[in-house]
Amino acid sequence: MKILLTGGTGFFGSHLLKSLVHNGHKVVLIKKEKSDTWRIKNSLSKIEVFNLDKYSIEELNNRHNDVDVCIHAATEYGRDGENLKNVIEANLLLPFNILTFAINTKCSHFINTDTFYSVGNNNWGYLENYIQSKKHFKEWGEKVAIQNKIQFTNMRLFHLYGPMDNIEKFTNSVIDKLLENKTINLTQGIQLRDFIFVEDAVRAFVNVIENKPEDEVNNFDVGTGKSIMIRDFVQEAHNLIDSQSKLNFGAITMDENEPKFPAANIGELLKIGWKPRISLRDGITKIVHSKKSLDL
């Protein structure tokens, strides 16, 4: 299949891109000039790159009017100095442009990457713009897809972790400090999260791509179906690494608005033959091995 992908230079998107290439799909990566390609440097010769800063969506229509599946995996969180304009462009305007492209070129399947942050009515302060933008695109995208008879699949990722994640992300930051035997100040760590290893999440997407669902609109939770406390993740990593780090649980006050997330409801994915394979222990081990290999 010919697959158009946004966000393919990011953490999740890069893993997905490499899996799609490995499976023999022709991938067209939509990216901006500034996007760092370090995660996919060994895959660049195997894909086609379309630079949004150089060419218009109309040019995309002209060059790639034979795409089978469009996947929107790009995102902006609204942190690290990102302003509201960037959040709207990445989470609303870009996916709408790609959905419009899909409709105009008779692409049969649009896949949207959603977030567990949008579950319920959580108050996340600095992430509020991100959460609302993701919610709005899902709602509007589904309506537009139904009106134009294109299949729309929403993939809600739960707490993703794995190799090559951003260094400031919780799981990556904790493992780095454990490897360096640094003292780690934490909350009580009783927050619940459904940690899903990136390879398992990628397999869920590939399953949906290669075994197309029957319904016009589909919603899948991508997680393990089980939540654990954050402190359990930290303790498991601490034990596996045999770190000398001191864990100061309770040193940081937990935000009173800290939401309590349910586990992913993976029933719909189980029905189409997917299930998580990587245990927490194995996932952490894979991250540690990846970090150590980069240091060689």
Image (cartoon, grey):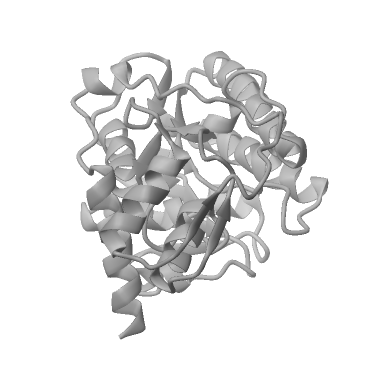
Residue 192, percent from left and from top: 48, 31
Residue 271, percent from left and from top: 22, 17
Work out which residue is located at the far bottom of the displayed protein and give it. Answer: 296
Can residue 238 be seen here? The reply is: yes
- Work out whether residue 115 or residue 40 is closer to the camera in this orientation and state it: 115
Quadrant hosting residue 47: bottom left
Can residue 66 be seen here? The reply is: no
Going 35% across and 57% down the picture, which residue do you hit? 238
Total marks in image:
0
Residue 105, percent from left and from top: 50, 37
Residue 222, percent from left and from top: 38, 31
- Work out whether residue 260 or residue 37 is closer to the camera in this orientation and state it: 260
Residue 252 located left or right of residue 107: right
Above or below for 172 versus 296: above
- Work out whether residue 203 or residue 31 is closer to the camera in this orientation and state it: 203
Residue 275 located left or right of residue 261: left
Is the N terminus in the top left, top right, bottom left or bottom right quadrant?
Answer: top left
Going 29% across and 77% down the picture, which residue do you hit? 293
